[in-house]
Amino acid sequence: MAKDPTKHQLAALDAHWRAANYLAVGQIYLLDNPLLTRPLAPEHIKPRLLGHWGTSPGLNLVHTHVNRAVKARDLDALCVWGPGHGGPAVLANSWLDGSYTEVYPDVTRDASGMRRLFRQFSFPGGVPSHVAPETPGSIHEGGELGYSLAHAYGAAFDHPELLVPCVVGDGEAETGPLAASWHSTKFIDPVHDGAVLPILHLNGYKIGNPTVLARLPESELDDLLRGYGHEPVHVTGREPMRVHRELAQALDRCLDRIAQIQHEARTAGSTARPRWPVIVLRTPKGWTGPRTVDGEPVEDTWRSHQVPLANVRENPEHLAQLEKWLRSYRPEELFDTQGRPTPPVLEHVPAGTRRMGANPRANGGLLTRRLPVAPLERFAVPVDKPGATLHEPTRVLGDLLAQVLRDTAQRRDFRVVGPDETASNRLQALFDATGKAWQAGTRPTDEHLARDGRVMEVLSEHLCQGWLEGYLLTGRHGLFSCYEAFVHIVDSMVNQHIKWLTTARRLAWRHPVPSLNYLLTSHVWRQDHNGFSHQDPGFVDHILNKSPDVVRVYLPPDANTLLSVAEHVLHSRDYVNVIVAGKQPCFDWLSLDEARAHCARGAGIWEWAGTENGSGEPDVVLACAGDVPAQEVLAAASLLRRYLPELTVRVVNVVDMTRLMPHDAHPHGMADFEYDALFTPDKPVIFAYHGYPWLIHRLSYRRAGHARLHVRGYKESGTTTTPFDMVVRNDLDRFRLVMDVIDRVPGLAVRAAGVRQEMADARTRHHTWIREHGTDLPDVAAWSWTG
């Protein structure tokens, strides 16, 4: 049990807090004169004033007090700063503890380094105003609000000794993802996981409005937090020394309670779901800044959100007010004549990797171990000849993932997340290796729930994404399994993660972290039972708009290619990998060795499917990407063999979508000579694609043969219907593809008019049949490859 802080300790806490506040203000305003050794002049002020002051004093307060607790208790702590736009505060604290200088040696911990720290902030060639990958100790950007608490829990999973204080801004607390994140208390295991200490910072305002939670009566807020599974501890005030004392006491009380919860679970075997503490911190927005500016109230209002004094260069009164503000922190007590922090400022700062700016878990690649992926031969399906057997690709993958879970049982560094769809996506083999993480109540009818489970299901894609991001950024591995249509819910979250990885790749000190791997299944072509609401393949388009250094998209056509792709992405680093694969029975086209070779190429000719036979250039190329398009292309190729045997057909399958891009646009892209060799520069190409057809045009528009490229894909025509009717509705079916060949190969339009008419009649027959029988045509349902 901790003792109340002494006056000396409180004075040291206040010194550190004032120093951090001074540095935060300096970053927003100053180009020069960092220690105010001269009267402040307009030329010392930045020409463009950018940054966020309002949240900074609160973040500095939390950092100061967590430092004290970490040092006093020798804690392993990583802090997540939800109001990530309060970058000046987090930068200030990493400069004070020396971790910033260790990463950036030119930003020394003295007057020269302070000047550089100030100048670079929100300045061309400098650092962003938000907490960012450039910030030591960070795993959370915070420019987009809502994800801090999910990231914090992701960091805590399978890190039993880790404490993750997480500052939740009250503006952020209004978002849907953050609201869902409070439910993480039902998933964190006090035995195998660390602890998250949320600190709900109610400073009262957003950019221009009050915040909802700050205006709730305290009893109503307490009811809300208790309903989420927390026990609130309040700290409220604006008098610094009183707040220091109360926050120190509150933090010790919460840490004692966390230690008690973990002891009871780990030593005494308690299985009761604990009520975890949360600190509710109420301090003024823009605390210690200007009370009024130009007669308008600023401190403790929305006006302090960004830059309280906006015209410092032009307005002498504002300049004088800024100087008074800076000097109110008494910098001469905080920094010596060389600009180095004085001993009282650093009294409670931890050393080495206990500093939050130097915690290796915030640079997770330092701690990452290679994932043990068993030999694929143990899971591959036998393929003696193409199209003779069928398997559910994701079920086959599930056996591989289950083995990864078994092989990491002691290490506990691999998790699978998804929104209540693991079994639906045919991955139920995972439950032979581990259960579903669950700390809430159970009933006899429940299945596979386990306090220590490493499959995580919650019906919030935001929460799955946030958990996994926090888990990966702290050095572990994972996979996100989701229905294809609903992964769009995290479009914005994956944007931010891609930006993080893109920036981190440019920082030599940031070590590569395991990739964010998506398995998108229950896809557009086999959501015929759920209908239009479940049919959207556009996540791939969204991803391929992003940084080519980071994004990868794979469409394996069968079980063995899915295994090969999965092996690759599970070993990869610093990527966002999207795999689109079916869960329904699918023909097996390639043996494991053939699948590996095909995946290594990313795109290639299926010689066994075409009719070239060494005859030279084909008359037409039938290309495909995706499992259902591959089947339709092969069925079309089979029809062409029967009806137009003299036609020379090449079949090309694309697994890696980025291969279609030029090499100068993506590292995986093909050079023009490679693309022309595969697709020909001047022959018609009929491309059956899994998603929206215009993506193929966009990826290949610079190619020589683009004018002869015709793409079929999903064109937003969906409903509850039969599987084959989905492809007919979208003109992706085998009959339509044969008609496309006839329409586009010179000379066929007249010569093969009868064949074209027969294909059109087959489509008409299909429409009549399904409306009478409710099933697909027998010759379609029973089709198999006989080439």
Image: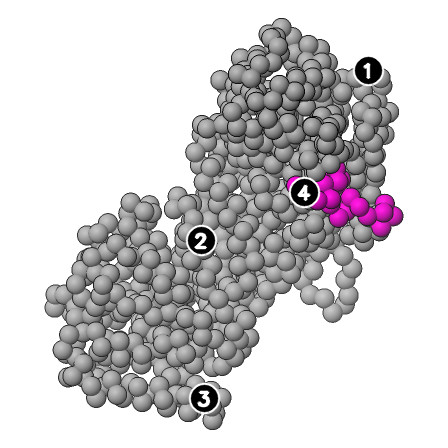
In the structure shown, which secondary structural element does the residue marked by tag 4 occupy? Answer: loop
Say which quadrant the C terminus sits in.
Answer: bottom left
Q: Is residue 353 left or right of residue 249?
A: left
Q: Mark 1 Cα within 10 Å, few/some/many (few <14, many 20+)?
A: few
Where, by quadrant of the figure, is residue 713 drawn? bottom left
Please, what is the three-letter code of the amino acid marked with disc 3? Ile
Residue 248 to residue 44: above or below: below
Q: Which residue is mark 2?
A: 543
Residue 179 to residue 7: above or below: below
Residue 330 appears in the figure: yes
Q: Is residue 712 left or right of residue 336?
A: left
Residue 733, given in percent of the width and then of the height, sits at 35, 77
Given this view, does label 4 or label 3 mark the residue nearer the observer?
4
Q: Which residue is mark 4?
A: 208
Tags 1 and 4 touching, CB below 8 Å: no
* Residue 10 vs residue 159, the one in the foreground: 10
* Residue 206 vs residue 601, the one in the foreground: 206
Please, what is the three-letter code of the amino acid marked with disc 4? Gly
Please, what is the three-letter code of the amino acid marked with disc 2? Ile
Residue 716 to residue 35: above or below: below
